[in-house]
Image (cartoon, grey):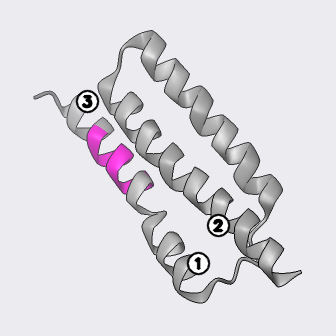
Amino acid sequence: MSITLVLGIAAGFLCTVSFIPQIIKIYSTKNVEDLSLITFSVFSLGVFLWLIYGILIKEPPIIIANIATLIFIVTILIMKIRYDKKGR
């Protein structure tokens, strides 16, 4: 396994799991007041484009990391929309 592949996997893993504490906090508190819908929407579009890029250049670390990150970001977006509506 090359150092480049190891770095790619490590970077993807760390960036992806960084969203787990946020998801847990949102789920437990149901508080999304301080989250920006625009920021998370734009970020999800960027992650989606990274996923497409990874697919086009056939790089598994980019593909896998961005699929997982996209799932977490979409989860946060869904909770933001759902819990914002409950608060109104």
Q: Is 87 placed above or below 79 here?
A: below
Q: Earlier in the sequence, mark 1 or mark 3?
A: 3
Quadrant (top left, top right, bottom left, bottom right) of the N terminus = top left
Magenta segment's dominant SS is helix
| Mark 1 secondary-structure assignment | helix
Q: Depth-wise, is mark 2 or mark 3 nearer the camera? A: 2
- 83 relative position to 58: left or right: right
Q: Nearer the viewer, residue 30 or 46?
A: 30
- 25 relative position to 36: left or right: left
Q: Which residues are magenta?
A: 9-15
The kind of residue on which mark 2 rests is Met
**Residue 79 circle label:** 2
Q: Does residue 64 show up magenta in the picture?
A: no
Q: Is 45 placed above or below 31 here?
A: above
Q: CA distance from mark 1 to mark 3?
A: 35 Å
Residue 37 on image: x %, y %: 79, 59
The kind of residue on which mark 3 rests is Thr
Q: Does residue 13 show up magenta in the picture?
A: yes
Q: Residues within 10 Å of mark 1 (few under 14, many from 20)?
A: some
Q: Nearer the viewer, residue 44 or 12?
A: 44
Q: Nearer the viewer, residue 46 or 31?
A: 31
Q: Residues within 10 Å of mark 3 (few under 14, many from 20)?
A: few
**Residue 4 circle label:** 3
Residue 85 position by quadrant:
bottom right
Q: Earlier in the sequence, mark 2 or mark 3?
A: 3
* Figure disc tally: 3
Q: Residue at x 36, y 55 (%)?
A: 14
Q: Residue at x 28, y 40 (%)?
A: 9
Q: Residue at x 79, y 64 (%)?
A: 36
Question: Mark 1 — residue?
Answer: 26
